[in-house]
Amino acid sequence: MATDAASLHEDSFGRTERRDAWWAGPLVTALVLGGFIVYSTFRVFYNAEYQLGHGTGVLPEHSYMLSPFYSPLLIFPWLPAWISPAMLILWMPGGFRLTCYYYRKAYYRAFFLDPPACAVGESRHNYRGETHLLLFQNLHRYFLYLALAFLVVLTIDAIHAAIWPKPEGGLTFGVSVGTLVLVANTVLLTMYTFSCHSLRHLVGGNIDCFSCVRGGQARYKMWRGTTRLNENHMFWAWTSLFGVTIADLYVWMVASGRITDPILFVMR
């Protein structure tokens, strides 16, 4: 069997004895990731209708809501008008996903067919690993630190979405569908980040004896927790991708007046 499997890689591209729809997974991945790239690129250059609520001039009676594509909101008057706030920050969470261990597998197969699938002939025969240009993938651990900082910012945004202005003045607590959307987005991104392979290594994967280091028991518990999350890293990678897209789309639709954000309750 080992000889037969190895010989497939020496044959022409796409050659395989598999009878299942092996191409379906890479195709769906290419369509979804491609769609996200097109949508996010459009929103980055659209540069409008990304916030609403008191203090913005858009629905001032509403709680403050900010699209995760534009958070934290950095506005510099001296920059050209075509440079949106999203351009200044999206490279950081985008870099975290681009260098993610799971996403590497996904887009290597979907966009570069390298390899197309297990036991399917590919276009090259010599494996050189992630060398030369692909050495930038080693930056993943540093993008992790930035992603952790973004979780703090998005948590603050979710809290702001639950603070409503009173007609007579002052602020109060309330929840709308938009509040839940931003909270869900933050939770999904937190699960994706906390299930990261690099975070698992950071909290415990780089030591051989937990009982031999300071705080070993606490680190062991953190390592076990991240390990459980890491087992479903693919699930969190996809759900968080959909979550952040839906959150941006929802804020856009409400800010543009295309839909109304239903209020579930506001304390008076």
Image (cartoon, helix red, strand yellow):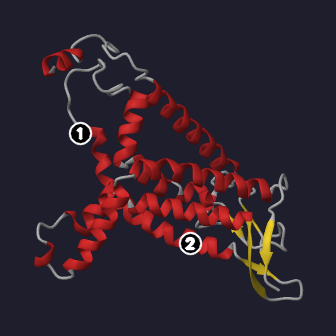
Residue 139 is situated, as x and y percent measured from the top left of the image, at 32, 54
Find residue 37 and report its horizontal and vertical position in percent. 56, 41
Residue drawn where x is 70% and y is 75% of the image: 162
Q: In the picture, which quadrant includes the C terminus?
A: bottom right
Give the percent coordinates (x, y) of residue 264.
78, 70
Residue 54 visible somewhere in the drawing = no
Left or right: residue 242 versus residue 113 is right
Answer left or right for 96 relative to 119.
Answer: right
Q: Residue at x 18, y 64 (%)?
A: 206
Q: Using a 10 Å C-alpha cutoff, classify the residue at mark 1 as few (fewer than 14 neighbours), some (14 to 19) or many (20 or more).
A: few
What is the secondary structure assignment of the residue under circle 1? loop
Marks 1 and 2 sit apart, C-alpha to C-alpha, by 37 Å
Residue drawn at the location 80% of the way across and 72% of the way down: 62
Residue 131's tag is: 1
Is 103 drawn above or below residue 88 in the view shown? above
Residue 163, horizontal then vertical, whole percent: 72, 79
In the image, 188 versus 247, the foreground residue is: 188
The residue indicated by pointer 2 is: 155
Look at the image and tell me in which quarter the N terminus lies: top left
Identify the amino acid type marked 2: Thr
* Quarter of the rendering containing residue 49: bottom right
Residue 159 visible in this rendered orientation of the protein: yes
* Of the pair 266 and 11, the residue shown nearer to us: 266
Work out whether mark 1 precedes mark 2 in sequence or the reverse, and give the earlier one: 1
**Up/down of 55 relative to 48, above or below:** below
SS of the residue under disc 2? helix
Quadrant in which residue 5 is drawn: top left
Residue type indicated by callout 1: Thr
Label of residue 184 in the image? none
Label 2 Cα neighbours within 10 Å, binned few <14 / some 14-19 / many ≥20 = some
Q: Is residue 58 left or right of residue 139?
A: right
